Amino acid sequence: MIWVLLAILIFGGGGSSLLADQLKQDEQHAKEVLKGSKESAAALELLESMRKLSAESFKTSQKLTSTALKQARAHERPSAEIGATLEASAAQLAQLDRTLLDKREALRALLTRDQWNAIFQSDTTGAGGR
């Protein structure tokens, strides 16, 4: 259990930095697509807040991973104590993820289907869409 949570913290945070980079690109593209529209200011604000949340999640993940590794190296520390720290850390990251998803849904509700598709038309991951 402890190692699974530790792996989530270690590997879960790496994607957040990539997400922040992608959101920055999406924000730039949205400026072009939404130029002059009534949704522009609100949409750009949502994208910026999503990028900031992603960066916060990445930093939090790195910090929590460091703390968890230090605790794991302390042989005298009980496993239950380490597990509790990891569970709290995972809960904190999950809350950041939920907030990010809420903002994404707010953005989706704000934009028309055509605006959404125009902003997110290109798939830079090669995964076939968003």
Image (cartoon, rainbow, N blue to C red):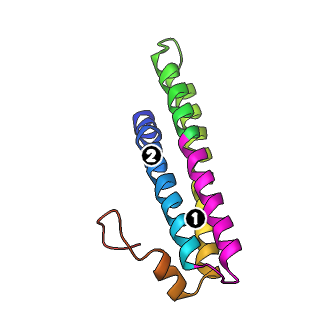
Residue assigned mark 2: 12
Quadrant housing the N terminus = top left
Q: Quadrant of residue 10?
A: top left
Badge 1: how crowded within 10 Å, few (<14), some, or many (20+)? few
Quadrant housing the C terminus = bottom left
Q: Residue at x 47, y 21 (%)?
A: 72
Q: Which is nearer the eye, 52 or 85?
A: 52
Q: Amino acid at mark 1?
A: Leu
Q: Residue 41 colored magenta?
A: yes
Q: Is residue 97 visible?
A: yes
Q: Residue at x 35, y 64 (%)?
A: 124
Residue 9, position in %: x, y?
47, 39
Magenta span main SS: helix
Residue 110 shown left or right of residue 27 in the figure: right
Q: Which is nearer the eye, 128 or 28?
A: 28
Residue 34, position in %: x, y?
59, 79
Q: Residue at x 49, y 76 (%)?
A: 119
Q: Quadrant of residue 126?
A: bottom left
Q: Amino acid at mark 2?
A: Gly
Residue 18 shown left or right of residue 91 in the figure: left
Q: Which is nearer the eye, 3 or 60?
A: 60
Residue 21 shown left or right of residue 36 in the figure: left
Residue 40, position in %: x, y?
66, 76
Residue 90, position in %: x, y?
55, 43
13 vs 6: above or below: below
The stretch of residues the image draws in magenta is 34-58
Q: CA distance from mark 1 to mark 2?
A: 15 Å
Task: For mark 1, give the secondary structure.
Answer: helix
Residue assigned mark 1: 101
